[in-house]
Image (cartoon, rainbow, N blue to C red):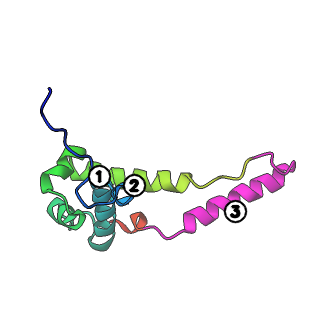
Amino acid sequence: MAGKPRASSTLAGVDDAAAVDEPSARERILAAAEALFAERGFDRTSTASIATAAGVPHGLIFYYYKTKMELLLAVVRDEEVEALDMTLPPLGATGDFRQDVLNLWTHLTDLLLRPSAVRRCR
């Protein structure tokens, strides 16, 4: 449609790099849910309090997640993916199977002992 101005992708006066670095609404919801679930527990955390902490409208939570339980599962999955993103030592790297298994075991132990807000959710 000619003559209809296109909406700008950035706000006036906001640097493009700064806009890219800001977390998305979905990321803010996940972060707020993780923190509040760990602090208050699942049952004592309302979706309204998560929305307030994330700085999003309450209904936006249900746009991304059908239920609060689905949101909790997304928080847990996000934590698992983050943990698995750490590079695992490749088997066969040393040429010594026992050493490779020891390296893998050490890595997994370190991973499981890392503090995690998700593990505190109850």
Please give the name of the residue rendered at 21% of the width and 66% of the height, measured from the top-left corner: 45
Q: Is residue 105 left or right of residue 44?
A: right
Q: Position of residue 25 (x, y in %)?
A: 27, 54
Please give the name of the residue rendered at 49% of the width and 71% of the height, measured from the top-left corner: 115
As drawn, which residue projects farthest toward the front?
3
Q: Magenta residues?
A: 91-116
**Kind of residue at badge 1:** Arg
Q: Is mark 2 in CB contact (under 8 Å) with mark 3?
A: no
Q: Is residue 65 visible?
A: no
**Kind of residue at badge 2:** Val
Q: CA distance from mark 3 to mark 1?
A: 34 Å
- Residue that mark 1 sits on: 26
Q: Is mark 3 in CB contact (under 8 Å) with mark 1?
A: no
Indicate which disc residue 76 carries.
Answer: 2
Q: CA distance from mark 1 to mark 2?
A: 14 Å
Indicate which disc residue 52 carries.
Answer: none
Q: Position of residue 101 (x, y in %)?
A: 76, 53
Q: Is residue 74 left or right of residue 91?
A: left
- Residue that mark 3 sits on: 106
